[in-house]
Image (cartoon, rainbow, N blue to C red):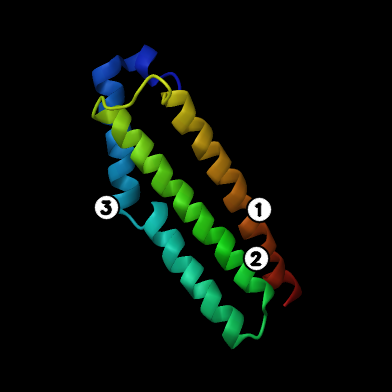
Amino acid sequence: MVNWPKKLGDRKAALYLGQVVRMLEEIGTGGAGFRFIYAAFLQEAAEVLQQPWLHGISKEMTAVGDLWRDFSVMAARICKDRANASITYADVAQLLHQIADKEKDIYKRLYKIKLNG
């Protein structure tokens, strides 16, 4: 993603980035929407299973959903050529890495429940 403008040119890079946003937010179950739904599930699970620590995980997942929304807004601004010079492809790619790290941590902790449960 960082190299798309150099490899593809500005127009095609913007089209690719726009497609990523559409796949995340409009077509599939990825992106922010799924994270908010999953956070609500974890909140209910905390109550049903009487595991209050799951409320914390739920809040973390909601924060990840917020980051996905931030990604989509930043990416859409780039696609529509409304980004100022401070928002770049490198910035959105870095945000994706940050999101991936946070999700990996959350899912690793949840996976331990399965192993220990």
Examine the rendered structure and indicate whether residue 42 appears above or below residue 28. below
Local crowd size for mark 3, using a 10 Å CA cut-off: few (<14), some (14–19), many (≥20): few
- What residue is rendered at 32% in x and 16% in y? 8
Local crowd size for mark 2, using a 10 Å CA cut-off: few (<14), some (14–19), many (≥20): few
Kind of residue at disc 3: Ile
Residue behind mark 1: 105
Q: Secondary structure at mark 1?
A: helix
Q: Earlier in the sequence, mark 2 or mark 3?
A: 3
Residue behind mark 3: 27
Kind of residue at disc 1: Asp
Q: CA distance from mark 2 to mark 3?
A: 27 Å
Examine the rendered structure and indicate whether residue 91 appears above or below residue 45. above
Residue 110 has which mark? Answer: 2
**Does residue 44 appear to the left or right of 115 in the view shown?**
left
Furthest-right residue in this view: 116
Residue 9 appears in the figure: yes
Residue 1 appears in the figure: no
Residue 72 in the image: x percent, y percent?
Answer: 36, 42
Q: CA distance from mark 3 to mark 1?
A: 26 Å
- What residue is rendered at 50% in x and 60% in y? 62
Residue 94 in the image: x percent, y percent?
Answer: 53, 32
- What residue is rendered at 24% in x and 19% in y? 11
The number of numbered discs placed on residues in the rendered structure image is 3
Q: Earlier in the sequence, mark 3 or mark 1?
A: 3
Quadrant (top left/top right/bottom left/bottom right) for the N terminus: top left
Residue 20 in the image: x percent, y percent?
Answer: 33, 39
Q: Earlier in the sequence, mark 2 or mark 1?
A: 1
| Front residue of 94 and 81 | 81
| Front residue of 84 and 62 | 84
Q: CA distance from mark 2 to mark 1?
A: 9 Å
Q: Residue 9, located in which quarter of the rendered image?
A: top left
